[in-house]
Amino acid sequence: MQGKRCAYCEAEIVDNNRHIEHFRQRSRYPQGTFKWDNLFGSCNRPDNCGKHKDQCSDYDYHDLIKPDIEDPEKFFLFITDGTIQIRSELNKKDTQRASETLCIFNLKNGSLRHMRKRAVIGYLQTAEEIQKMAADFSKEDIQAYLQKEISDTAHLPFATAKKHALSSGI
């Protein structure tokens, strides 16, 4: 269902780097151990995502963005240098939830940031080419081309970061 991508960071899940993640920790919510809506595919990196969450002290799971219910893109901007920023237009509660999600899953982690940056490099070049085409094609044609590019990358690792890179400056 997740397209072999981590539910939290969108990195590729490979056979030797996978983890069945319990959104609500089993130690605090044992009755959710086998509940489908509490299970996600996660990368198995110890310094971010599910493994990192499981090592955190107490937190309220209501303060986290649940990726099967809410679109994380509503909360975050993915910058072309690999960083994630919280959207400035959020209300105070959603800003706090976005901040808590970044912290609990350690999504600002340096190695993860570098992975996102490497993943978007080619798409930045595509975005530049789209900008150059703007003078020769209608806005509708450019938008249609951009939407096709975004659609073609929707199943890939770091799809949201790629989408934001493709949309940059357009």
Image (tube, rainbow, N blue to C red):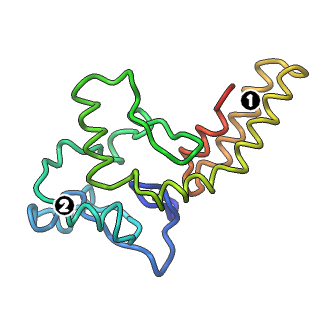
The quadrant of the rendering that contains the C terminus is: top right
> Residue 82's spot in the image, x, y percent?
54, 48
> Residue 19's spot in the image, x, y percent?
35, 72
Inspect the image, locate mark 1, and give the three-letter code of the amino acid beneath it: Ala
How many neighbours does mark 1 have within 10 angstroms: few (below 14), some (14-19), or many (20 or more)? few
Of labels 1 and 2, earlier in sequence is 2
> Residue 9's spot in the image, x, y percent?
43, 55
Residue in the image at 35% along x and 47% along y? 67
To which residue does mark 1 refer? 144
Establish if 132 lies above or below 120: above
Q: Secondary structure at mark 1?
A: helix
Q: Nearer the viewer, residue 122 or 19?
A: 122
Marking on residue 56? 2
Question: Could you say which quadrant of the image residue 58 lies in?
Answer: bottom left
Q: Nearer the viewer, residue 151 or 25?
A: 25
Cβ–Cβ under 8 Å for marks 1 and 2: no
> Residue 121's spot in the image, x, y percent?
69, 50
- Left or right of 78 on screen, residue 49: left
Inspect the image, locate mark 2, and give the three-letter code of the amino acid beneath it: Cys
Q: Secondary structure at mark 2?
A: loop
Establish if 164 lies above or below 39: above
Residue in the image at 55% along x and 59% along y? 115
Mark 1 vs mark 2, foreground winner is 2
Distance CA(mark 1)–CA(mark 2): 44 Å
